Structures are given as C-alpha cells and as structure tokens.
Image (tube, rainbow, N blue to C red):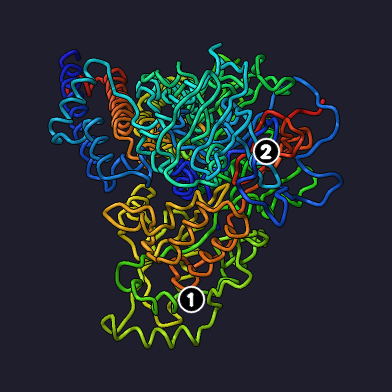
Amino acid sequence: MANSADRYDRRTFISRGATTAAGLAMAGVGAPALLSACGGSSNPGSSTATTRAGTPGVSTATPVRGGSVTIGVSSEIDGFLPASSHFDATGLTYANAVFDTLTAIAADASVRPHLAASVMPNADLTVWTVTLRPNVVFHDGSPLTADVVLQNFKAIKASALTGQAVTPISSVTTSGDLTVIYNCDEPLVAFPAYLATQVGYVIALSQLDNTNSGSQNPVGTGPFKIVSWEPNDHFTVERNPDYWNKGLPYLDTVTFKPIVSDQSRELSLRSGTIDLMVSHDPGIIADLRTDPGFQQVNDLTQTAGQPDMDFICLNTTIEPTSDLMVRQALAYATDVEQVVKLFSRGVVTPNTSLFPEGSIYRAADNGYPQYNLARAKQLVAQAAPNHGGSLTIPLVDITDPRQAEIIQALGSMWQAAGFKVNLNQIEQVTYISDLVEGKFTAAADEQFSSPDPDLNYVWLSSTTASGPIALNFARNKDPLIEAALQKGRTSADKSARIEAYQTVDKRLSVDLPYLWFSRAPWSITGNTTVQNFANPILPDGTKGLGFAGGVFRPAQIWMKA
Amino acid sequence: MSRYIGARVVQLVFIIFFISIVAFLLVHLLPGDPTISILGPNDTAQARVELLKQLGLNKSLPLQYWTWISNVFHGNLGISFLTHQTVSNAIGVAFPIDLELIIVSQILAFIVSIPLALIAALRPNRIFDRIATTSTYAMLAVPTFVVAVILVLLVAVKIHIFPATGFNPIGQGLGSNLKSVLLPSISLAVGSVAIYYRLLRADMIATLQEDFITMARAKGLSTPYILLRHALRPSSFALLAGAGLSIGSLFTGAFVVEILFQLPGIGFQLIQAINSRDYLVVQGMALVAAVAYVVINFGVDVLFTFLDPRVRRG
C-alpha cells in the first residue's frame, strides 16, 4: 500500500520525520547489558526473507575487509542535524553510517547500550543515569564527553521539530566527564528506547555549533566519515580508522544514491549500477524476493518494536465522521481483505490492529469490525438523517498513481454502502498541513513505526488532540486510552504494560479513528556479492535488529571477493 | 545589426525581469508553506511564526521580492530552507548536468535528423521518405519515459553496458561521464529527431524547387554540394527556431528523464523544491531556467541575422 516516490516519503515524513521518537535506530554495539525496558516480543525480531540456502543478509563467513558498496535509497534528506533534520528511513540509515546512538535495539526487542556503557534508572524510574563509553572520539578528534551529550540534548529539547519527542524528560545534568543524568517528570520506563532513536544520536560540538554548514557536514563517532554529500545525487562515506568498536567497519567506502523512483531503483540493481536497495513498494518487493539473482530481507515478521501501519485516518471532530455511527459504517463497508489482496501483491496480509501479528501488545481479539456490507448499509440509513439526509466523505491522499487506485477502490466500497465519496489527491505539503490542522475528513495514512509503544504517545494521546495544530490527527479523545497510555509509559511491570497497550488496541476498535489495512512492508535487496547487510552483532554478542522500517546499519556489511 | 542586437538585449532584460516576478508570485501563491516541510507535523503555532520570521516570510510580498531580487543582483540567490545549501551551489550542480544532457542529446538529434531530412527531401514521397516520415511519426508518439525505460531494460539491465541511473561528472573520466549521459540523452533526442526532421524536410523540399537550385544543377554541381552549400542554409530557419524552443524547454522539461535516470538536474530539483515549498530554490532554479531559455532563443535570433540578411535589415 505504500510508495516512496516523494522526496520525503509522505508516510515516513509523518511517522518519523517530525517525531523522531518514532524512528527505529538500530545499534551495533553494546557492553554490559542494561535493563530491557522495551518489553519483549513473542516473535524475536529477526528479519525474514526468501527461502534459498542460507539466510539472506546474514553471513557467518570470515569478513573480507575493504571494497565499496553502492546502496540505492528511496529519498533524500535535508541535513544531518538530529535536532532539526528530518530523519526518515534514509536519514536514519545515513545517520547510522556517521553517527552512533546512545542505545540500540536488539533483535529480541531489548534495548542495549551503544555509545553509552550503561543506562541505569533510580528506583521509581524518574531519574536515568547514562554512563558513556570512555575513549570515544569524534571524527574531528574531539572526545565524547558528558558535556557534549548535554549540549546535544539541549539542542533536541529546544528544537520545534524534536522538542515534543522528549517532553517527558524535564532536565539533564552531568556528573564528571562521562556521566549524564536525565530527570523525568514521571516514571519513564521506555527511556532507553528513546535513546535508540533520532534524539539519541550524538554529534560533535564542532557540528552542533556550526550554524552555517553544520547540517551539511556530519561529525559523529560513527563507523564512517563523510567524503561528500551532493543532495539528490549521492552521499559517500569512508571508513573511520579510529572507530571505537575495533575491527569495524569492514568496507572502505559506502556510497548511498537516493533514487526516488522504485522502478528506477530496481532497474539500477538489476543493471549492477547499485549493489543494494531499499524498497517500500509491494510490487518491487514481490518481484525481487523470488529472483534467484538477489537476496532479500524484509521486515514483515518483525515485531521488535512497532512497524508502520497503513490505514485511513478519520477526523473525529468534524461532520460526518465525528459521528461514531458513521465511522462504524465506514469500517463495516471496508473490505480489508479485498483491498490488501488487490494492492499488496501478496506481500502483506490484512491487519486490523494498531499492532502487527505476533506483537505482545496486540489484543487477541480487539473487536475491530469485520466487513459486513449489510450492517454498513443499515448504519448509513440510521445515521444519514442526522447529517442532512446523506453522508458525504471526502477521502484525501497524496498525488500518486498507485494511491489513486487504492482510494478509488475504497470509494467504490463506501459508495456501495450508501456513502457519497469525494476522492481528492493533493500535494504532500498541503496534505500534511491539512492533517495537522484537522482540515480533512478521511485521509489515507501510514504511521506508528516505533521501537516502543510509548513513543507513539504523542500520536494517540488526548493531550495532543486539540488546538489549531494537533499531533493526534484523528483528534480522538478517549479517557480510557489516555489512562492506558499513561500506564504504559510509567509502569515497569511488563505484564501491566502489555495489558495497557492491549487496552489501547481494543479502545481504538471501539472509537474507530483509524480504519486499518495492513502493516507497511519494507525490504532490502542485494546482489549476491553483498554480505551481511542485515546482521549487526552487538558487542556484547547479542544480535542487533537487522533491518526494520527501511533502516539498517552499514558497519558490518562486507563484499565477497 | 548592432542596433538590432541592442534592441533585443533590452527586450531580454525586460522579459527576465517579468519572469522573475511571475516566478516569485507563483511560488508564493501555492497553498501550504515551507514551515510544514521544515518543522514537520510536530510543530506549534508559535514555532511556525518564529520560523516565518527567521525566513523573512512574515514580510509583505513586495518587500520579500525586493530583498530577493536585490540579493540576486549581488550574486546571492539565497539558501535552501531545507538543506541549508546555497541555491547557487545547487544550481552549480544541476546546471552542468542539464547542459551536458542538452548538448549530447541535441548533437545526436542533429546527427540523425539532418541527413534523414536531406535524403528524404531529395525524393519526396518515395520509399525512403515514407519510411523516414512514418518512423518520425512513431518517434513523436512514443513518450520519452517509455523510450527511457526500454533503453534501460535493453542496454543497462540486459547487457550491462550502461548504468541505469546516476550521473558521473567529467572529472571522474570522460568515458564514464558519457556512459552516464548517453541513455538519457538518447531518450531526449528521440523527440527532437522527429521534430527537426519534419521541419527541415518541409523547408528543404520548398528550397529545392527554387530557381537558384535549378541554376546550380544546370551548372553541373554535385547533389551533395548543392544540398549542403546552397539548400541547407536557407532551409534551416524553421529548424533553428524549433531547436531554440526545444533546447530552452529542455532545461526544465527534461525532468521526467532526470527522475527516471536519477539525474539531479534543474527540472528534477525544481520539482523537489516545489513539493517542499523551498521558495528560494524554486525561485532561483526557475530564474536560471528562464534566463537560459531566453538567452538561447536570443542566440538563435542573432544567428538568424547571420543566416538571413533580411532579418538584420528589417
């Protein structure tokens, strides 16, 4: 259901671009294990792929050092400042090349230290002490210190873009050279997961203080150093010989090439112009996953964290979708099986929940309405008199041929139930503006990618559902959801958190601000020469989250001789 | 002739000034504002107001235009709201790509279309002419993006001779540079070949019926000599005018090919900037494209004065 032909893919823009909190940033390093604040997963989050011999993207052979790889990514970014740049899937992958996050997500969904040597809470989880790894230097030779992390946090907190993502963290202080203390207003059980996202990247002061060209010249502690960045053409990095995780990276250089058209990216891979490509297009994923000339890894069974979901967002504050009966009618009128069957090329399956199949947070039976045209017609007949005799639903999406087909199919289904449907495709900037300002009735959307459900708080909370600009786009206010979100945020008891988010899932099926379709698929496909592109091993020996949401780490990739 | 050129230069300055106003106004009349792109949906009303102030977008349109155009006259096209790259730098990357694409594609187009048109005009409505005319009809009918995809599938994917996407600057070697621009150039040349062939063929047929051509034949001059030395020049006015329009429009009109081949030329970057309301980039790119268009057509006009004395007299 997704396509990434825009500069900022509309969906990734919304799901990650702004919050930062939602972006999965996969770590590659660790030390003594810290608490597993993120909760577990009933299905360890290893990416799966085609069924050829061996596991695609994973190599146990002795790595070959040196060489170069060219990687086709789906968009271009607007800069390298974690506090002010929009890190979509491409941005997070670029960042993983030149920066490091303080923590990282493991394949089993636990949170591990990365630049941090440890992350420890006080008894009530309101104060978190981060001890930094010693003897780490930035690309400019300056040392990683507690003060640098503090300055980074101040920039994050002050930024209009990222400030809201760290709202629960009220202040930060330092103690000595390597200790940073984060004070939270309330218990923040998912705190370590926050440090695995965009707000957890640490950049050098020379970049942070460079107001002229800092956003174009990343200076991090990451495995690679920038060689050149030509927006819309390439981003080339070279091996950082002083990388603190000794032995890494394997490659001499990596060149990322933003190729916005999925088809062009596929042709580039097939022609040998690039070695590895990311895709968000079910058609491309389907084409490449059965091709024996390539190895593909996708995130379709990934349950470490939370993937993006495809859905229709309904505005609960304007006519006629402010009427629950209308939203129910729309849900009953939507044949999810049919929509997914028509447009996903068999890559994804229907998923009528906030959480994917296999997630511990998914309610066994969330009560989401199943397709029932007769029931939909009945509800339309009941509701129509309250809305002037007929129900008109303006359904909006971004301009994209593929999306046009999807909303046309939806429009037909809703019309069959008795709705009048006005389909409208608009430009991305206007689309986002309308969503934020509540100037829509129904909008095709993709959201909720996050390493921990708490990081989706801003999108779901009643506290962000009012005003001229609201991050809870549907503007759904439900005290039970709010209470459950608070419980999920503050409770250290794993089973209590699971119960809280299952409550959220169930309540969303009652309120119906979202009409679910499926999880959004991502894949990474390489030729047979590229090795180990989805197999980051953390320094403590645990397996890192290999590939999720279009994001990966290039440090442990190597090329077969 | 200098008076003619002087008058055209004055005209050109007014045209560019007018275009700068239109480009500026059109961009600012678009719905949505750049704060959405910069701040994302996570912004606040206060942050938006602050940002608009920082970007100077809280001022009146005339004042904004004056600030921008004054800076342009000082060689400062501004800084991208999004990438913080200077617009001049972005143009410095994009312009050579377009320039090379246009040069290579037009050389290819002339190499193919001129001989075809000359041969076809020699014997109109005979077998060669019919085949060539039908083929160029087909070339006109096939969209550029279809040609591009077919070329990529055949030459890049099947036999791996050329890269499917990307641009290699000349600095990386002439061979690799030409390899990276050849497929997009052929895609662009196909449409031009058809147009140039048809324009030149029609004029050439008319020229070949002129008395001076009959005289040349009577003097026993060879056909190639007559075609190239006597007939080509007076037949090339429409071709030149067509080439001027075509080349000028390629500065922005090549964006489909640029997107397919991932060449960050002016058209490609312009579309990206429009989508994200990166005003200064849009204005800068539009201005450069417009100037290029006008200058090229000015060049064509000047060329006319050399080719046809009636133009400079009249």
**Marks 1/2 same chain:** yes
| Circle 2 Cα neighbour tier, 10 Å, few/some/many (<14 / 14–19 / ≥20) | many
Percent position of residue B217, x then y: 45, 25
Q: Quadrant of the N terminus of chain A?
A: bottom right
Percent position of residue A325, x then y: 39, 79
The mark total stands at: 2
Which residue corresponds to mark 1?
Answer: A413
Q: Which residue of the protein is positioned furthest toward the front in this rendering?
A: A123
Q: Quadrant of the C terminus of chain A?
A: top right
Please identify the quarter of the rendering in which residue B267 is found.
top left
Percent position of residue A345, x then y: 65, 61
Q: Amino acid at mark 2?
A: Leu
A479 vs A228, left or right, is: left
Percent position of residue A343, x then y: 58, 63
Residue found 36% across the figure and 37% down from its top: B38
Q: Earlier in the sequence, mark 1 or mark 2?
A: 2
**Relative to the observer, which residue lies in front, A370 or A137?**
A137
| Circle 1 Cα neighbour tier, 10 Å, few/some/many (<14 / 14–19 / ≥20) | many
Q: For numbered disc 1, what is the local secondary structure?
A: helix
What number is the disc on residue A269? 2
Residue B250 seen in the figure = no
Residue found 65% across the figure and 62% down from its top: A357
Q: Chain of mark 1?
A: A
Q: Chain of mark 2?
A: A
Residue at mark 1 to residue at mark 2: CA–CA distance: 38 Å
> Disc 1 or disc 2, which is closer to the eye?
1
Please identify the quarter of the rendering in which residue A517 is found.
bottom right
Please identify the quarter of the rendering in which residue A113 is found.
top right
Q: Amino acid at mark 1?
A: Met
A492 vs A421, left or right, is: right
